[in-house]
Structure formats: C-alpha cells, structure tokens
Image (tube, helix red, strand yellow):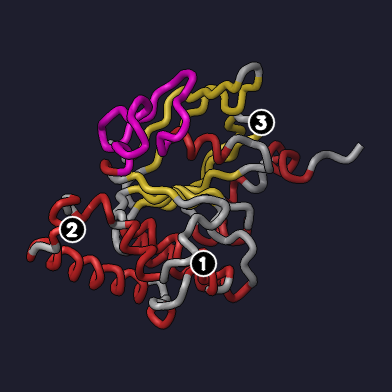
Amino acid sequence: MNLLDVNNLTKRFGGLVAVHSLDFFVNDGEIVGLIGPNGAGKTTVFNMIAGMFRPTNGEIMFNGKYIHRLKTSSIAKLGIVRTFQLTNLFGDMTARQNVIIGSHQQLGLSVWSSLLNTRHARNVESKANQEADDILNFMGLAAQADMLAKNLTHGLQRRLEVAVALAARPTLLLLDEPLQGMNHEEVKGMLDCIAEIRRQGKTILLVEHNMKAVTSICERVVVLNFGEKIDEGLPQTVMQNPAVVEAYLGVEE
C-alpha cells in the first residue's frame, strides 16, 4: 500500500482551476519531488494534502485513511507535517522554544497540569527540552539553541523551520521550497539534512525550484504545469521530456 495516494484531485477558486484531475502516489520511505514552473499549482496541492484547502473534487488517502475532508489539526496528528515557502517562526523566541512549540500536539499535557506545575508537567517539560535539543543537534543547530530565531541567518532559519516540523514527529514531511534563498554551502548542508531525515525513516514530498538539488536527492518527480500533471518518473528521464523543458523554458518562436 502506498503511504500517500492522490486521486483525481481538483481545486477551483471561482472560475480558476488551480489543480485539475491530479493523480500521483508516494511510497513509504521515498523522497518525491513535486515540481513545475511558478503558478503550476504545487503549493495548492500541498495545502490540500495538509488540510488547509478542501478539494473541489478527488480524494487523498494517507496510510489507508481518507483525509481530504479532515481538519488540518487532525491531519497533523495522523503524521503529515509541512513547512512553508516563507519562514514561519516565532522571531522573539529562541530556537529551542520554537522547536518545543512544534511538539505541542505530542506532549499530552493538559492546561491545568501546566498551570499547577505538577510533577507530570515538570517531567513532560524536561522531556520536551531534551527532545528539542536532540532535534537541534540533528539539524546542526546546537550552538544556536538559545539564540532568538530572528537573529539567525536565513539559512539557519530554514533549518530551524524543518526542526520545528520534525518536533511534530511526522510520518510524511512536506517541504515547500526548503532551499529558497540559500547560498551554495547552505544548500549542500540542507540537502545533507534532508537525506539524513530520510535515512531516519521519514517519507518526504518536496516542492523545490533548484533542479540540480531535485535530481540529486529525489527518487521520483511529478511535474505540474497549469495545474495538470505533464510527466512523472525518474528525475533524469523526466527532465529530458520536451514538454517539461517547454514548461520551464518556453519555446522559441
């Protein structure tokens, strides 16, 4: 059974068809790229998978369960967690505090326990701090644990956002342009992190415009253009498809 199945997925905004009759799947343990030019519908697909948009038509199945009518919080509890194109951090909190907030759904701590500072609450808080430090170390951010998020460089902020997502213990991680705005060294470091996340047993669906990075890390890619799938397969094969080249580069008169 595929971990994620997207069947006949369509999203309309009034008269605009953002995604049309899209089918694709993601196997457990894969890194799959969802690629295409700007405006192709990639982020709309992410928003439907994560529950932020409800599909106009079609179905999304995750781990054998239909999720396309569920709320975002319910989908996150099932194990789908996403990042965003723009960093979505609490700038006036430390890196560690941001990661702890990312784990809030997994803590199982009631408001009263927290307010009364019970032994259970203290134990949970201690465990959350340790897990946050473990994740920060994994993402190469141990030295920045006590720094305010707003004071981190852009590349480190992107890493921190992935760390926050990992704190929610995802089964399927949706990465929306994680390499955006990075220099060469930052890209290399993030790709190493993504590869290690996969080795730790996570499945990844990746939206990214850096084609060199996509071909180096993704086992398969799904290509969208104007909301429709135009190809799917091995990255090196797909990137030689004339329809894909035309979608990215256009055609000379």
Query: Mark 3 and mark 1 in contact (Cβ < 8 Å)?
Result: no
Which image quarter: residue 195?
bottom left
The residue located at (51%, 50%) in the rendering is: 84
Front residue (pair 124, 44): 124
Q: According to the image, label 2 marks what residue?
A: 114
Three-letter residue code for mark 2: Ser
Q: Residues within 10 Å of mark 3 (few under 14, many from 20)?
A: some
Q: CA distance from mark 1 to mark 2?
A: 29 Å
Farthest bottom residue in view? 143
In the image, residue 55 above or below residue 222:
above
Front residue (pair 156, 228): 156
Q: Quadrant of the N terminus?
A: top left
Q: According to the image, label 1 marks what residue?
A: 157
- Is 40 positioned to the left or the right of 10 in the image? right
Q: Residues within 10 Å of mark 1 (few under 14, many from 20)?
A: many
Helix, strand or loop under label 2: helix
Q: Is residue 101 magenta?
A: no
Three-letter residue code for mark 3: Phe
Q: According to the image, label 3 marks what residue?
A: 226
Helix, strand or loop under label 3: loop
